[in-house]
Image: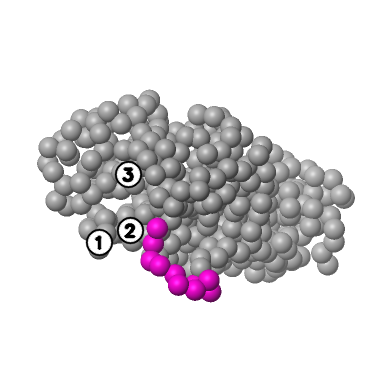
Amino acid sequence: MINDFDLRMMALALRIGERGRTSPNPHVGAVLARDGVVLATGYHHRAGEPHAEIDALNKLGGQAPGATLYVTLEPCNHFGRTGPCSEAVIASGVWRVVIGCEDRIPGHGGGADRLRAAGIEVELGVRRAQAEVLVQDFYKHALLGLPHVTLKAAVTLDGRMATRTGDSRWITGEAARKHAHRMRDQSDAVLVGVGTVLADDPELTVRHVKGRDPIRVVLDSALRTPDHARMLRTVSSAPTWIFHAPDAPDERREALLRQGAQLLVAPRAESGLDLHAVLRELARRDVVRLLVEGGPHLHGGLLDAGLADRAAVFVAPRWLGDPEALPLSIGRPRERMLEAVSLREVTRRSFGDDVLIEGTI
């Protein structure tokens, strides 16, 4: 029987599970408690390191007799980079395990059944919706071979992300820009089109908060990225990957290689590069969380191709009133409001005078 304490402990495990650099593994959090007291918490730090439940158990010397384990994802029951967590949980003396959601990857599941077979009480599906959100990026990568894509933008009240000349500095205030950098820190890679590079010359690094730079990815069919682009000159541990068409000029290839860019070939599509092919290649390179900070054509292309999973839009209390200013996205026309792209599970947060609206597409 699930009680209020169980719900609080799972909420704690979910918050803790957001930490870590786990790609291509899932984000998972765990809490060990006994008699209403938290004994230890844990999370999966990165691929190849202990899973969340083992991270928590290690803080207690691997033993937690009579404790309840709260874990956001079903303990694994197979050998991968690490051993099966189900066996470690059984050996720890835990008497009860409360699980957020099942592991749906073929060959990975069965942990709950193994625990039950060992006489451990198992409760499955506690805060299931939130637990599945925590691993939705992992599932898309593992089951579909594609990264989980978040479209991020800052817009005015009339939905414009830049003036007609391309100027967008700054639509939002400092608090919103800091949070945007936190989003970069939480992503494996950030994607832009060459138009954004030419208009803004962005670094695409994490500067306003403490964190790790994401891989910088540019879609640039003809390799128009300037040799002096800031993302090529900024000192960063993150590489810059530039996708280009097979017929891009050889002299541009050589110039950008000299600047340290990594060049990747993608097939052409009706307009620009084949976005499916680009995303498949990013997933093959273990990019699980992809943040898109591109312009309206890139956002529109991903929406039209059904490749975008989430939107994070900062709305600032200002407007341009110019029909020629750049909108959030440009894609296929939708003639009826019923055809509009919609968000579900919408949240709203304030950052100074700006509001961040997030949701699943």
Is residue 337 highlighted in magenta?
A: yes
- Circle nearer the N terminus (2, 1): 1
Left or right: 26, with 290 as reference point: right
Secondary element at tag 2: helix
Q: Residue 98: x, y in percent?
A: 73, 60
Q: Write down the residue under mark 2.
A: 275
Is residue 164 highlighted in magenta?
A: no
Tell me what residue is drawn at x 66 percent, y 55 percent: 347
Q: Is residue 33 visible?
A: yes
Residue 333 bears which disc, if any?
Answer: none
- Circle nearer the N terminus (2, 3): 3
Instruction: Using the rendered view, name the quadrant where residue 208 is placed.
Output: top right
- For residue 97, above or below residue 48: below
**Which of these two is toward me, 92 or 230?**
230
Q: Write down the residue under mark 1.
A: 269
Magenta highlight range? 330-339
Tell me what residue is drawn at x 66 percent, y 51 percent: 348
Secondary element at tag 1: loop
- Circle nearer the N terminus (3, 1): 3
Instruction: Using the rendered view, name the quadrant where residue 127 is placed.
Output: bottom right
Asked if the residue under mark 1 is in contact with the one under mark 3, i.e. CB atoms within 8 Å, the reply is: no
Which quarter of the rendered picture does the N terminus lie within? bottom right
Report how far apart the C-alphas of labels 2 and 3 lie in the structure: 16 Å
Q: Write down the residue under mark 3.
A: 195
Secondary element at tag 3: helix
